[in-house]
Image: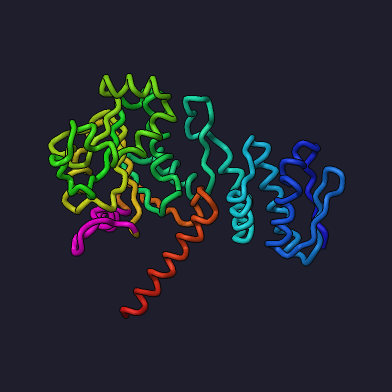
């Protein structure tokens, strides 16, 4: 069986093949198919399934290049996995559309099917739960959408919060004012905001109260109106804190709750408010629950393997207990 992919131009071919043809070699090795270059064409030879998969992967990579995106090892392996699952065509949907634009003019796009479903859910629902391991972009994408909503005048302010469980939410013993005390727990949120707004604009918005970053405990007793509200690391919120947070929702607001249920820091015996909320709220109107997996990890490829190793270990432990 022979399948051919026409790239149409030498510059596209070079980008698709990668340095020293590393992308082509990886596809051929992973799928067990022979591959060669003929002019601006890429030719696959082997059994029917392998040749078809090789062509589908290269067509996906070509669409990635045409969308102005770079092909790194993580994206390459993801394209191969999508093809094996019969979803190679999904890459085009992922490439279409920009989530937001950073302060430096760089467009932020989804990189996996799960991320696309997550951002679509946030756009379509008032409350969205994003659950998944580290590196899946849960918080970063939520912040990007919050910034886009603020710039588009859909909301009047952005509120970001996390449970400061490491300090037991009792921050009084720490030196300095409130901002100094909570900074270590909220640093990832600050970093994402600075990237999207730029340092100068970010500082001005903080000063006038258009951006608020605070521990979860400081949400009590408030009604959050015309705001894009993000609760990060929600696996560390108790059931009581989660109920308190969700019932702060006011008119014109949108809430995104993110967390990793495998990494709770709550004391033994304490039920995660995130786990409980998803259990009782999933299926309710205008509430979405998105579950990202190791397939959506967009950090170093090794992170996906680390996540899978921990998941296997958790399953093994549960098996030993039964």
Residue found at x 73% / y 65%:
32
Q: Position of residue 66 (x, y in %)?
A: 68, 37
Image height of 226 relative to 32, above or below: above
Quarter that holds the N terminus: bottom right
Q: Position of residue 238 (x, y in %)?
A: 20, 53
Q: Residue furthest front?
A: 175
Residue found at x 72% / y 51%:
22
The answer to whether residue 288 is left or right of residue 55 is left
Residue found at x 49% / y 51%:
297
Quarter that holds the C terminus: bottom left
Residue 280 in the magenta stretch? The answer is yes
Q: Nearer the viewer, residue 156 or 206?
A: 206
For residue 182, which quarter of the picture? top left
Q: Position of residue 159 (x, y in %)?
A: 28, 33
The residues colored magenta run 263-282
Residue 269 in the magenta stretch? The answer is yes
């Amino acid at each position: 069986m022979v399948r051919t992919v026409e790239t149409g131009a030498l510059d596209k071919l070079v980008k698709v093949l990668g340095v020293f043809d590393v992308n082509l070699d990886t596809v051929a090795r992973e799928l067990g198919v022979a591959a060669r270059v003929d002019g601006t064409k890429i030719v696959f030879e082997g059994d029917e399934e392998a040749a078809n998969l090789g062509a589908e992967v290269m067509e996906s990579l070509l669409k990635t290049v045409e969308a102005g995106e770079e092909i790194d090892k993580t994206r390459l392996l993801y394209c191969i996995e999508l093809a094996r699952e019969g979803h190679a065509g999904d890459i085009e949907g992922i490439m279409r559309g920009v989530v937001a634009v950073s302060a430096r003019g760089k467009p932020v796009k989804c990189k996996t099917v799960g991320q696309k479903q997550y951002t679509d859910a946030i756009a379509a629902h008032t409350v969205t739960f994003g659950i998944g391991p580290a590196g899946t972009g849960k918080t970063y994408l939520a912040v990007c959408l919050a910034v886009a909503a603020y710039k588009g005048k859909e909301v009047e302010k952005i509120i970001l919060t996390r449970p400061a469980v490491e300090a037991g939410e009792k921050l009084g013993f720490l030196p300095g004012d409130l901002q100094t005390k909570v900074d270590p727990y909220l640093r990832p949120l600050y970093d994402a905001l600075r990237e999207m707004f730029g340092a100068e604009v970010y500082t001005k918005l903080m000063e006038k109260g258009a951006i608020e970053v605070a521990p979860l405990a400081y949400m009590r007793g408030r009604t959050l109106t015309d705001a894009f509200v993000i609760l990060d690391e929600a696996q560390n919120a108790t059931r009581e804190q989660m109920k308190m947070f969700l019932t702060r929702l006011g008119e014109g607001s949108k809430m995104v709750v993110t967390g990793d249920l495998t990494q709770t820091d709550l004391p033994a015996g304490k039920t995660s408010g995130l786990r409980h909320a998803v259990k009782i709220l999933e299926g309710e109107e205008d509430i979405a629950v998105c579950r990202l997996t190791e397939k959506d990890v967009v950090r170093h490829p090794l992170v996906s393997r680390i996540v899978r190793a921990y998941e296997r270990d958790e399953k093994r432990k549960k098996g030993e207990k039964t």
